[in-house]
Every structure is written in structure tokens, then in C-alpha cells.
Image (cartoon, rainbow, N blue to C red):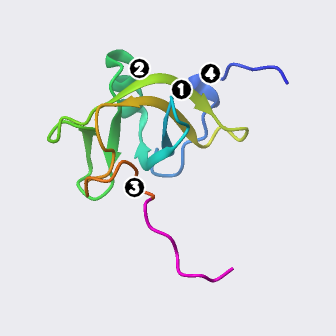
Amino acid sequence: MNEAAVSLDELRWDERGLLPAVAQDAQSGQVLMVAWMNRAALDLTCQTGLVHFWSRSRQSLWLKGESSGHFLRLCELRVDCDADTLLLRVNPAGPACHTGAASCFYRKLESIC
């Protein structure tokens, strides 16, 4: 399958101007976290190489790792087939989760399937 480039104009932002962004460890492939990006967060991420997100609760931009020092350095940015979700392949400088866990996905749902 050929890799196709997607332009910024093709991204399908939601009604709030946001896209879900999945942060994945570029080395291990482990999913680290999921957050939201608006155009400003995406622009800052591309300009600085450090991942920025949009906080829906605070209604503001945030640099991942700004308070903890656990920055996410962008290696590669991918877009899903519908152009409505971003995959950020990153090199983490420490745990991604605010709890101190390497990934935010460290808990299992009780057996339902």
C-alpha cells in the first residue's frame, strides 16, 4: 500500500475545531495517551517538535511535560484514513501518564468479554 500525504486542509476537525490525538512510543509501539489537538496545538507541535495539546477542561493549550519534565518529542505525525484522528509517534522523556505510569492505559476493564 502506498503512503499518501494529507494536507492540513484535508483534516476533518470536529465542531469544536478539535481532533483526537493518539501518542504512541515510536520505539516500542506502546500507546501512551490520547488527548485533543486544535490547529494551534498542531502548529506548535510541528514548529517546536514537542507535543502540545488542547485542554478541553481548562480551555487552553498545554505543552505535555511542561510541569513534569516528561516531554513527548515528535518523531512522526500520521493521519487516519478518515483524516479525523492523528497518530503522534513520539520519544517520551519519562512516563506519559500523570499518575507516573508509562502509559495512561495501564488498567484493565473488568472481564466483560
Tell me the kind of residue under disc 2. Answer: Cys
Residue at horizontal 35 percent and vertical 16 percent from the top: 47
Distance from Cα at disc 1 to Cα at disc 3: 20 Å
Q: Quadrant of residue 12?
A: top right
Distance from Cα at disc 4 to Cα at disc 3: 30 Å
Q: In which quarter of the image is the C terminus?
A: bottom right
Q: What element carries label 4?
A: loop
109 up-or-down from 28: above or below? below
46 up-or-down from 31: above or below? above
Q: How many marks?
A: 4
Where does residue 6 sit, x and y in percent of width and height? 66, 23
Where does residue 3 sit, x and y in percent of width and height? 75, 20
Residue 7: give its label.
4
Tell me the kind of residue under disc 1. Answer: Leu
* Closer to viewer: mark 1 or mark 4: 1
Decide: few, some or many residues near mark 1? Use Cα within 10 Å; few <14, some 14-19, many ≥20: some
Seen from the viewer's position, the closer of residues 3 and 9 is 3
Tell me the kind of residue under disc 3. Answer: Cys
Inspect the magenta stretch and tell me whether residue 102 lies in it: no
Decide: few, some or many residues near mark 4? Use Cα within 10 Å; few <14, some 14-19, many ≥20: few
Residue at horizontal 42 percent and vertical 33 percent from the top: 39
Residue at horizontal 41 percent and vertical 39 percent from the top: 38
Residue under numbered circle 1: 77
